[in-house]
Amino acid sequence: MRRLLVGVAVAAFALAGLLFAQTPAPALLKSPQGEASISTLELNAQLYVAADDFVKAMGGTIEPDGAGFKVTLLGRLGAFAPDNQYGVVRDELIAMPALPTVIEGRAFVPWQFFRGFLGNAGDFDLQWNAQERIFTVSPRVRESLTVGMSVIDLDDITKVVVQLSGRTEFTINRKQQSYIIKFGNPIGAPFTEQSYQNAHLAKALFRPNELELQLAGPDVQGSAYRLDDPFRVVLDLRRGAPAVAPGAAGFIKLPQQRLPGIRTIVIDPGHGGTDTGAIGPSGLEEKAITLALAKKLSARLSRQTRARIVLTRDTDDLIPLTQRTAIANEFQADLFISIHLNSSLRKGAQGTESYFLSLEASDELAKQVAERENEEAGAPAAPALAGDLNFILWDLAQQEYLKESSDLAETIQDELSKATNTENRGVKQAPFRVLIGATMPAALVEVGFISNPDEEAKLKSDEHQNRLVDAIVTAVDRFKTQYEAKLGVTTTPAPSAVPSQPPTPAPPTAPPPAASDKAGR
């Protein structure tokens, strides 16, 4: 939350100057706490309310915090700031139609902030009657949502995708050998009970506002996240150590809602361990060069972008392809970049090329590159899915990030081409298994041909490695600036993190996250 509150107040002071001549007008607030008069202000057709009046009438508290204000209401902590068009409560963003402002130390905020706050914190609705100048707080009537459920097997993970017709709050609770997803709205289920011949999931049972997933064994554990547009709850099931003792209860810790912007970048050094990747004429191994480049890239990106940088590996370890994007999802990454070296039987093959995910390769050469990268880790050449499952997985993995992934790959390729002064092999798409499941813009970069003796020699040198790293850093910084400009946000960096080994999914024994200050995002 502190990230939201830090920033310059120039815009606020300018707006305050415009508002100073405005005269606050009273309005009536009707709520379960009673009736109270609150001050309002209109500017550019937007209605503002005096935050202190509203919070006091609702029995809460408000206090300055840095450049913004902390609000405690209905037992929940939230915040807003004069330089940010997003408020926050319970780790949820609240979009406002205009910036809050401060006049002589008193905060005025668009009334939609409190509508979002009450809806998230207390299941209340806030309505404004402009003719009678009355705000009304009343319990929110919850509509019934339709639900669809898909079960997708992907290597050692079973993805349970629950799609709803609208947004709703939910919790996921471990109860003996089941996960219970409890929804804030009543649901219209596609079935009452269904069994599965699956390594992780035995049965699914729908009830009026919950879904029970009976697991195939006590050692099946889960990690969960949500996706929007359309709203989906995704539960990844995999085998592992018993998540909780038999008969015990606990909660899956859900990742926090992402704030707009690029704050966390995951760099994936291709291959590792027994998977050497391609080998050059002199014996140079792809896995060693990708790791060296990733470490340099991590240090440079951290300094240049001030984002948190995470490596999927920082030692010579074999990390399964599906686990690499799982790491990115666990860290709530905003970008995922996988680093590789190319190889060809054609003696003079050279240059760089960049990829984004597609179930269909853009050409035969792109298909061969994907097959080689997928096979080197012992995986099939392409996802073994058919028909509608292809669409479901594609939608789940990258559909909503297709344009951003294409732009990221294009920007990286442009900078690499200028920096290396070699053949620009362009931007392509292919079914790279390492990109499947990434819930953020993602690209795979082939920075050179290790099979070419001349390029192999360059790849050994610090000078050429630094040239490649500088190009990717410039590209990511360009993409970040353009991406955040479209969103209309300015990010404050998260602390850098480079794990020595891949993180394991959050254990289901932790309670669901309470409102936090997001300083660790």
Image (cartoon, rainbow, N blue to C red):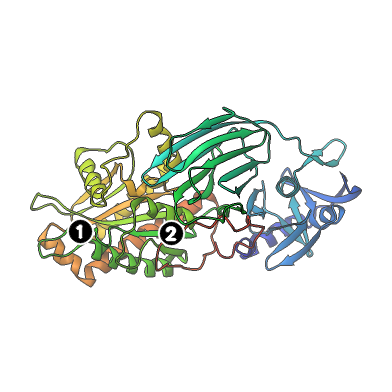
Coordinates of residue 340 in the picture (x, y in percent): 26, 56
In the rendering, which numbered label is found on residue 265?
2
Q: Quadrant of the C terminus?
A: bottom right
| Front-most of residues 505 and 495 | 505
Element under label 1? Answer: loop
Taking 485 as reference, is 115 left or right?
Answer: right
Image quarter of residue 268 = bottom left
| Front-most of residues 267 and 428 | 267
Taking 269 as reference, is 172 left or right?
Answer: right
Element under label 2? Answer: strand
Taking 478 as reference, is 365 left or right?
Answer: left
What kind of residue is marked 2?
Answer: Ile
Marks 2, 1: nearer the viewer: 2
Q: Is residue 514 above or below residue 367?
A: below
Q: Residues within 10 Å of mark 2 (few under 14, many from 20)?
A: many
Coordinates of residue 54 in the picture (x, y in percent): 83, 52
Q: Which residue is mark 1?
A: 421
In the rendering, which numbered label is found on residue 135?
none
The total number of labels drawn is: 2
Coordinates of residue 436 in the picture (x, y in percent): 37, 45
Q: Quadrant of the N terminus?
A: bottom right
What kind of residue is marked 1?
Answer: Asn
Coordinates of residue 312 in the picture (x, y in percent): 38, 60
* Residue sticking out furthest to the bottom: 462
The first of marks 2 and 1 along the sequence is 2
Structural distance between the alpha carbons of marks 2 and 1: 27 Å
Q: Residue at x 42, y 42 (%)?
A: 199
